[in-house]
Amino acid sequence: MRHDGRTTRSLAKAARPSLWLTTLSLLAIAILIGLGVWQVQRRAWKLVLIDRVEARVHATTTALPPPAAWPAVTAASDEYRHVSVAGRLLNDRETLVKAVTEEGAGFWVLTPLLRDDGTMVLINRGFVPADKRDPATRPDGDASGTIVINGLLRMTEPKGGFLRDNDPAHDRWYSRDVAAIAAARGLNDEVAPFFIDADAAPNAGVYPIGGLTVIRFPNNHLIYALTWFALAFMLAGKLFVTFGGGLFRRGRFVHERAGKTAARGTGSDAGTIVEPT
C-alpha cells in the first residue's frame, strides 16, 4: 500500500484561499473591529452629552455671560444653558431661516436684540409657517420697547443645513449662522457669537411660536457597534473554516496498481481509500 501524499497536499492547498484574498479578509476584519470600537466610544460620548444637556435644560435660569466672556463660550461648556437677557428687538432686521418642526415646515424668526450697553444678541423668537413669513401678516407678534427674553443658549451654525449652503446675497438661509446673518443685516461688531432659542412664553398674536428647541439626541451607537462586531465575527469564522478546510479533512490514501492504469484494485492488492469528511 502507498500513501499518495501529493493528492493530500493538493486537496489541502485547494481548500485554502489565495494570499491576497486572505490579506484583504484580515484587513476587512480589522476595519470592522475598529468601527465597532469607534461606535462604543461614540456611545460613551453621547451618553455624557445627554446627561450634560439634561442637567442644563432643567437648571435654573442665569444671566447671559458678559461680553468679555463671549470668546470663551463653547458648546461643551455653555450650550443649552437657560439664560435671560433684556433689550429691544430690532424687528425690521429679522431673518427667516428654513425650519422643520413639530408644527410643520416653515421658518425660524431670528431677530437682533439691542442691549443697553450697545451689544447685540440674535434671538430665535420661534417658528412661523410659510404663510406667515411676511412680517405684515403677524404685526401683533412684534414686541416693542424693552423686553426680557428667557431661553436656551445655542451655538452658531456656520455650515448650512438641509444639505444646502446659506445664500446671503439672495436672502436664503438654511442654518443659523450668526456671523453671516449679522453681516447681511448690517449689525455692529459687538454681536454675540451665539444665539438664544426663546422659550415657550406666548407672543402676542400667536406667532412666532417659541419653545420648540429639539433636545433629543439619537443614540443608536450600541446597535451599530454590535453590527460591526457581528460582521467581523462572521468574516473571521468564514476565513477560519476556509483556511483550515484542509486541516479538517482526513487525508486521501490511494493505492495505484502497477502499470499505467489507474483502476482501483480489489482483494489483497487493493489500496486503502479514506474519503474526505
Image (cartoon, rainbow, N blue to C red):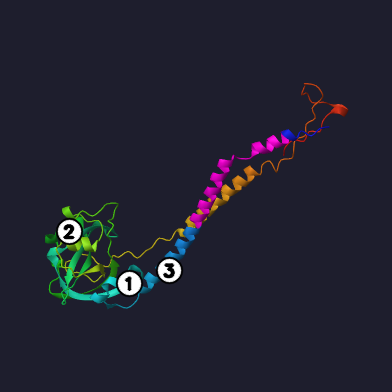
Residue positioned most to the top: 260
- How far is mark 3 from mark 1, CA to CA? 14 Å
The label nearer to you, 3 versus 2, is 3
Q: Which residues are magenta?
A: 7-36
Question: Which badge, 3 or 2, is on the more N-terminal residue?
Answer: 3
Q: Quadrant of the N terminus?
A: top right
**In this view of the protein, can residue 89 be seen by the observer?**
yes
The residue that label 2 is drawn on is: 132
Q: Secondary structure at mark 2?
A: helix
Q: Position of residue 172 (x, y in %)?
A: 20, 54
Q: Is residue 34 magenta?
A: yes
The residue that label 3 is drawn on is: 48
- How far is mark 2 from mark 1, CA to CA? 32 Å
The residue that label 1 is drawn on is: 78
Q: Position of residue 3 (x, y in %)?
A: 79, 34
Q: CB under 8 Å between callouts 3 and 1?
A: no
Q: Amino acid at mark 3?
A: Val
Q: Amino acid at mark 1?
A: Asp
